[in-house]
Amino acid sequence: MSEDRESKAGVIPCFPMRTELLHPGSSNLKYEIRQIVEIGKKIQALGTKITWENIGDPVAKGEQVPDWIRTYVQEAAGKNENFGYSPTLGLESARSYIAKERNLEGGIQIRPEDILFFNGLGDAISTLYDHLHPSARVIGPNPAYPTHSSAEAAHADAPHITYTLNPENGWKPDLEELRRNVKENPQIAGIIIINPDNPTGFVYPQETLADIVAIAREHKLFVISDEIYSNLSYEGSGMQKLASVIGEVPGIALRGISKEFPWPGARCGWMEFYNRDKDENFDAYAKTLLNAKMLEVCSTTLPQAVLPQVMGDERYYPYLAGRTAAYARKSKKAAELLSTIPDVLITEAKGAFYMTLVFKKGALTDSQSLPLTADAKAVIEPHLAGANPDQRFAYYLLAAAGICVVPLSSGFNSDRYGFRFTLLEPDEASFEKTLAVIKQNIEAYIAS
């Protein structure tokens, strides 16, 4: 860099490009789940210990991958073939295992050829929306998981169209609103469900799934079911996968190992295609997704290689049952404690490892605050202007108590105010202490 450029503090002279570079929908790509970390790091640098309740990474929160799973990975890493490319669809051994297990569950039957591996579900979700017809829309839940809502909105260069998950009704979806929005928006081609849901922990009852499939059948839509947490549903939740009710409606289920093993760093997820033979348009779309993956050659080989061994081990499902029992205990404890606050709504989770607290309407204002040091106040002040009320609370909670949660409105494309936190802390006594601090700060904030 020249001295002239350095003298201008790194500012590069104006170089107007001949044409616009940004995709028109790029401003919709937001992920506050990670963006809030930058604020948290600045608070941490002031000497505050941060409790990171924003990211759903079991490993980062201290969960230990069992030694027997590690052994399978180590043995697979010792085989030379696992350093090479996999077939574009994925390893035959992994796809055959998944198809066999899927078919044993009942419902629609699939073949290994109906499964396509990706480098994690983030890759799969981006590919889904990137290759939809430019005018085709996919309606999703509110609150929404931002990878879905942002990618769909960016694809369309328009706000994500949603149906409401109702916190006053245990997060059950408003099916009448879904029907109405589908009728009023003829460009809608598909419906998204996330089951178990992120951020709420809601599990769709089978009759609700069937109703959503009926809406899709009536209006000639396909259904996307993100089931990354399907094997982390709690005992008695009534969890059913899309395959159990899909019938002859075209559909795509999304699954992966990042939360289950847990191995988020493996970046290993897959799509299951249902009823490609029922519609030429849907079949052509599925082939396009395969062609898109073919341009990348394939997805990561090593995690595919160990999948049948790990999931087929007799210890696997008891291991998951132990984890989900712990999540269920913490969810119950959180609901018991936080529901005593008059100004909030909170419902026990039934799956995954998240919960969402909602502030009742009118509980939050733009004048509320928590006591802060001058340095902590200086960190969050630039972010308060124009922030939604739940963002303001999240920033104050972070600066005052060192607890990092994700605001519902900005983090999950919601018109309700609240925040998501995780159930991942392995030490249940520490988890209860965090809950107590959250409760204390909510009460102080609302009373301020």
Image (cartoon, rainbow, N blue to C red):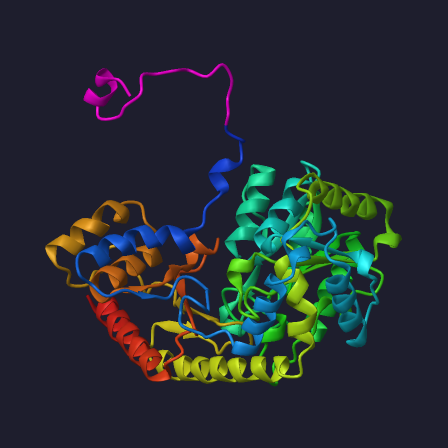
Q: Is residue 117 magenta?
A: no
Can you see residue 244? no
As drawn, 77 above or below 230: above
Extent of the magenta region: 1-21
Q: Nearer the viewer, residue 346 or 350?
A: 350
Q: Note whether 218 is above or below 185 in the view shown.
A: below
Q: Is residue 262 left or right of residue 275?
A: left
Where's the N terminus, which quadrant?
Answer: top left
Identify the residue shown where x is 55% and y is 59%.
Answer: 266
Q: Position of residue 324 (x, y in %)?
A: 53, 80
Number of callouts: 0
Name the quadrant containing residue 121.
bottom right
- Identify which residue is drawn at 27% across, 64% down: 50
Name the side, left or right, on which 155 lies relative to 279. Answer: left
Q: Main secondary structure of the magenta part?
A: loop
Identify the image quadrant of residue 229: bottom right
Q: In x, y percent, where is residue 271?
A: 70, 57
Q: Nearer the viewer, residue 75 or 194?
A: 75
Relative to 174, 53 lies left or right:
left
Q: Kindly identify the residue that appears in the image at 83 percent across and 62 percent down.
A: 111
Residue 9 colored magenta?
yes
- Residue 389, position in %: x, y? 32, 56
Above or below residue 94? Residue 220 is above
- Work out whether residue 205 or residue 175 is closer to the camera in this orientation and state it: 205
